[in-house]
Image (tube, coloured by chain):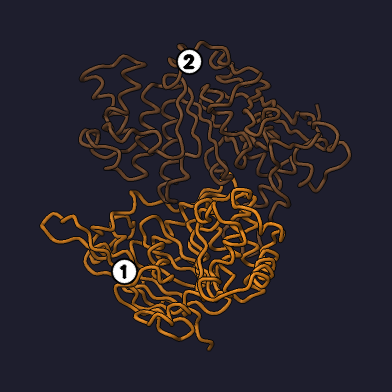
Chain colours: A orange, B brown
Amino acid sequence: MTTPVLEVSGLKKHFPVRARLPGGARGVVRAVDDVAFSIGPGETLGVIGESGCGKTTMSRVVLAAIPPTSGSIRCDGEEIVGAGRRTLAAYRRKVQVVFQDPFSSLSPRMRVEEIIAEPILAHRRLGKAERRRRVAELLALVGLDPAAARRYPHEFSGGQRQRIAIARALSTDARLIVLDEPVSALDASIRAHVINLLRDLQARLGVAYLFIGHDLAVVANISHEIAVMYLGKIVEIGGRDALVETPLHPYTKALFAAALPSLPGEQREEVAPDGEVPSALDPPSGCHFHPRCPFAMPRCAEIAPVLAEHVPGHRVACHLYS
Amino acid sequence: MAPALLEVTDLHAEFRNRDGGAPLSAVDGVSFDLHQGETLGVVGESGSGKTTIAHSIIRMLPPGGRIAGGSIRFDGVELTTLPARDMRRLRGAEVAMILQDPMASLDPMFTIFDQVAEPARYHRGLRGRALVGEVADLLRQVRIPSPKQRMRDYPHQMSGGQRQRVVGAAALAGRPKLIIADEPTTSLDVTVQRQYLDLLKTLQRETGVALIFITHDLGIVAKVCDRVAVMYAGRMVEQRPVERLFHDPRHPYTQALLRAMPKLGSAEPLFAIPGQAPNLAALPRGCSFQSRCPQAGAPCLAERPPTVALGLRQEVQCHFAEGAPS
């Protein structure tokens, strides 16, 4: 078996909050609460969940932008949590990011070539000629004209800016790119271009993706494996086909039920759950989903279910399956 | 058939060109109508003019924009020439608008009560206990639990979904005949989006209000709309009942948009529409879609496409469209 590019286990990120809860206890937000997954070379793990489920905090921890409270992150077998500066620097070169909004993630005062070369320059010196050659190569890779190098971000459309962001992420020969809602801000016709570009780059370069999104159809299109998060926990994880065809967790089913139809009159049978995601500051006891779950049983309010394998390769955290 | 509630005829709206030069034509000869209780979806990409249509109807075009021609008749009244005073009376009372970001509509300094009460006070003259009762009813209608308590809250004390429902309550408070919703669920989570769309449809059934849904998401159109208008570069290129549009799209752009919709469960590469949306400052002669269209031919480069009737209130603007057998 090949070593995963990224292997995360027992990952927790808790934020202390200043406010006191009724009863006087100090609040802690368990933004990421005991999460485990791994991503192989050239593979895509899709993460879906609603606001506050912890997917963005998880990506920031994975990017080593903030340290985890506890847990392990291994990249190509090497432990990153608590590692020294040199290991971290090498890790940050291997793991890059593309953000949702290409209008705020690219500095308006830098030329495209400076934007793209910035991650390389953070790690090593680069001559002018070599830099120019590398930038041209990267621009060609993402389907932009090399002349774009001398221009500024405002001269480009949203889709083109996202291509620039992808070129930047690839500049250090990244092994893994964290894609945080990379197409959510784009128009429908542009979205398909960017998704297809990402798939094409993966096929050519073998880069792995951690793809965070809320649009089920888009996430399912690009992912090999999908994880569903709810209030800091992965409630279900499995291969794309298994998860889409036979979702197990009631929350996953609810997400599918709430998805918009692709044809009029194609009403999904399941009923979408009532209510909204509760506050992460004071999550429900037991299974966090139980107050909204149509199948909740008494023990769901008491005992938190653990993520367990239901069929090989498909794990779910739900008492219905234990 | 009863006369249409809203009748837009050959509407033109333009914006001053910041780089000098001719004004940009954001809405270019758009005609459609809408009946009471009906839901029209207006779909298109950024810059296609869908929001400008909405702003023209309520006469709130941003600075630099103006209605350059055409007519908007609402409930028998011509809006394009209506004096500003009468227009103010009409906004909120007859036509209400729901925006994408609820915090853009709600004032953080005022309580939920103040904001929902304002249209009822201003347009319907309600005061005192009657007003409090009405606000509670409206909040109940949009499924805000314990409305009597929650109306004392401020917007920041509510979740995103609740805020958008409060905006819905405020929109209903003046008893409008038409609500224009501009991407109302873009900032909401999927499960909350579903609840909100269901709620709007329920409110429509209860009140008979007409709805215009502005969106770039064909999934929303499939879920809530009766009719659809597709915008491209300022023109309404196709107008159909929702079933017809999805099963038998006639305009090449509509066909491409439908193909580009990601379908759940498909792992095939997505269909991507070639090329880019045109620049309004440099539109080609003829059809604006020509450079991206697989069928484009000589007439498309030379002349503006004709409007071809496909049946009652159904039309497409394409040189290659075949009309309905009459």
How far apart marks 2 and 1 lie (CA) works out to 53 Å
Q: Residue at x 34, y 74 (%)?
A: A11
Q: Quadrant for the C terminus of chain B, please.
A: top right
The reply to whether the C-beta atoms of the residues labelled 2 and 1 are less than 8 Å apart is no
Q: Residue at x 67, y 39 (%)?
A: B244
* Residue at the extreme right: B298
Q: Residue at x 28, y 58 (%)?
A: A280
* Frontmost residue, B22 versus B19: B19
User: Dot 2 corresponds to which residue?
Assistant: B87
* Frontmost residue, B161 versus A18: A18
Amino acid type assigned to the residue bearing label 2 in the image: Met
Vertical placement of residue B149 versus B114, above or below: below
Q: Where residue A198 appears, x then y in whole percent?
A: 61, 65
Q: Quadrant of residue B117?
A: top left
* Residue at the extreme front: A128
Dot 1 alpha-carbon crowd within 10 angstroms: few under 14, some 14 to 19, many 20 or more: many
Vertical placement of residue B268 versus A92, above or below: above
Q: Is residue A241 visible?
A: no
Q: Is residue A67 left or right of residue B316?
A: left
Q: Are marks 2 and 1 on the same chain?
A: no
Q: Where residue A6 appears, x then y in whole percent?
A: 47, 78
Q: Quadrant of residue A221?
A: bottom right
Q: Quadrant of residue A16?
A: bottom left
For mark 2, give the secondary structure: helix
User: Dot 1 corresponds to which residue?
Assistant: A13
For mark 1, give the secondary structure: strand
Vertical placement of residue B206 versus B254, above or below: above
